[in-house]
Image (cartoon, rainbow, N blue to C red):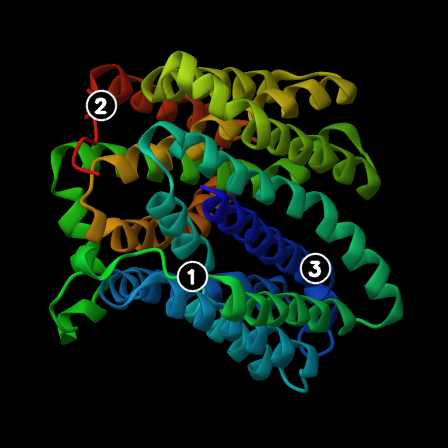
């Protein structure tokens, strides 16, 4: 038990470093790209290339971890991220920047493998709580990262990228010495890898075709699609409507990060034991719908602070609970693959969520992405009400 606590603490640090690194890069990437190309598309391609190659690689990395263990895959992913960040810092040409994001995307299995490890070491009754602790690192990363990135960016535009690389490399080195393997050999897939394992669509289709896991993955897609569209467009919406400064956007993001960190870091475990996964998912979805509707019609900027807190509360309840429920209804030797699939699906929503939200924002009306997201989440509510959780007695 004490060993599991140490592993969980290390995994928390990995995810924290991962999101700090991501936000470090966000603070300077537009400025660096503008040295070679001043179009918005050139900057957007950094995110698109990362997401595309993460989509292609994540299910494959998950399968590798199911066959050969979590430890080697996680260490390779951390080293790959470090290499990608260092290359970005070196720069020298636009194609070099794109190459760096391709490398990081292809080895971007940090979060999915980390989630699989948490599932390996967590008893069923503690899984939602432990996944919430890892989720809290996400919120903290988005609080700490921009602050460090802004400071380092004053020294050098390349400094945040190098810092992100150092974070990833340090995590890999420490992990090499202290992280044990968490997937026993008797729970691994004995088959050798085949060429078809490289096809992400095969893994996605495999799980979507199963009734219960398919429902959960559809819910995962809708929630991430809606939230990614909101995250990208809400600064434009707020700036146009209230004529505010960048520091005000930072304040809203700070509130969001704090709420997610508090909910997932401390409250989610107790709530899961009292109310159960299904009720938490229904409550989180209802809260998220209410938050999007309130955001759409807010007529005072200061009202956005509690509204962002409501939205973040909803997301904070849904994410770890959904991951926990997914891990409980697949076999132990499929956990790596299914979280690779969820990472791949998350990559797709990172591409298409902001794209569709931007189109609705520009061509329909500014609050259309949030009203549309609320309608999509009504589908999630319907699916959740009909969903019957399965006790994972096999684990």
Judged from the image, the secondary structure of the residue bearing numbered disc 1 is loop
What label does residue 389 carry, if any?
Answer: 2
Q: Position of residue 220 (x, y in %)?
A: 34, 37
Most distant residue in the right direction: 155
Residue at x 51% of width, y 15% of height: 290
Looking at the rendering, which quadrant does residue 183 occupy?
Answer: bottom left
Q: CA distance from mark 1 to mark 2?
A: 31 Å
Judged from the image, the secondary structure of the residue bearing numbered disc 3 is helix
What label does residue 24 carry, if any?
Answer: 3
Quadrant holding the N terminus: top left
In the rendered view, tell whether residue 346 sits above or below residue 216: below
- Disc 1 marks which residue? 180
Looking at the rendering, which quadrant does residue 186 occupy?
Answer: bottom left
Residue at x 65% of width, y 65% of height: 167
Q: Nearer the viewer, residue 268 or 60?
A: 268
Q: CA distance from mark 2 to mark 3?
A: 39 Å
Q: Position of residue 22 (x, y in %)?
A: 61, 58
Judged from the image, the secondary structure of the residue bearing numbered disc 2 is loop
Residue 363 is at least partly visible in this image: no
């Amino acid at each position: 038990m004490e060993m599991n606590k140490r592993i969980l603490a290390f995994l928390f640090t990995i995810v924290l470093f991962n999101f700090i690194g991501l936000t470090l890069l966000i603070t300077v990437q537009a400025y660096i790209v503008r040295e070679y190309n001043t179009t918005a598309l050139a900057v957007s391609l950094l995110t698109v290339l990362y997401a595309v190659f993460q989509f292609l690689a994540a299910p494959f990395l998950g399968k590798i971890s199911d066959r050969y263990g979590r430890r080697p895959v996680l260490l390779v992913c951390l080293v790959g991220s470090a290499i990608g960040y260092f290359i970005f810092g070196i720069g020298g040409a636009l194609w070099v920047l794109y190459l760096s994001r391709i490398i990081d995307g292809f080895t971007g299995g940090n979060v999915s493998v980390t989630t699989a490890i948490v599932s390996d070491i967590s008893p069923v009754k503690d899984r939602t709580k432990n996944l919430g602790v890892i989720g809290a690192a996400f919120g903290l990363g988005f609080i700490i990262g921009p602050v460090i990135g802004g400071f380092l960016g004053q020294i050098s535009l390349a400094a945040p990228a190098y810092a992100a690389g150092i974070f990833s490399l340090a995590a890999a080195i420490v992990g090499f010495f202290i992280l044990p393997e968490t997937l026993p050999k008797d729970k691994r897939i004995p088959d050798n890898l085949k060429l078809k394992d490289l096809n992400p669509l095969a893994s996605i289709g495999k799980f979507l075709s199963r009734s219960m896991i398919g429902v959960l993955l559809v819910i995962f897609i809708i929630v991430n699609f809606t939230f990614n569209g909101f995250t990208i467009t809400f600064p434009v919406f707020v700036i146009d409507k209230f004529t505010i400064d960048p520091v005000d956007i930072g304040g809203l993001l700070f509130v969001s990060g704090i709420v997610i960190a508090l909910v997932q870091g401390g409250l989610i475990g107790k709530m899961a034991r009292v109310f159960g996964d299904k009720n938490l998912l229904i409550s989180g979805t209802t809260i998220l719908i209410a938050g999007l509707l309130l955001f759409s019609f807010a007529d005072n900027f200061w009202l956005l602070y509690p509204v962002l807190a409501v939205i973040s509360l909803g997301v904070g309840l849904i994410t770890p609970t959904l991951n926990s429920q997914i891990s409980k209804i697949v076999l132990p030797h499929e956990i790596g693959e299914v979280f690779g699939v969820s990472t791949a699906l998350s990559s797709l929503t990172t591409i298409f969520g902001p794209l569709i939200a931007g189109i609705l924002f520009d061509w329909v009306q500014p609050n259309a992405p949030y009203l549309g997201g609320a309608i999509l989440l009504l589908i999630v509510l319907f699916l959740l009400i009909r969903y019957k959780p399965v006790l994972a007695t096999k684990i």
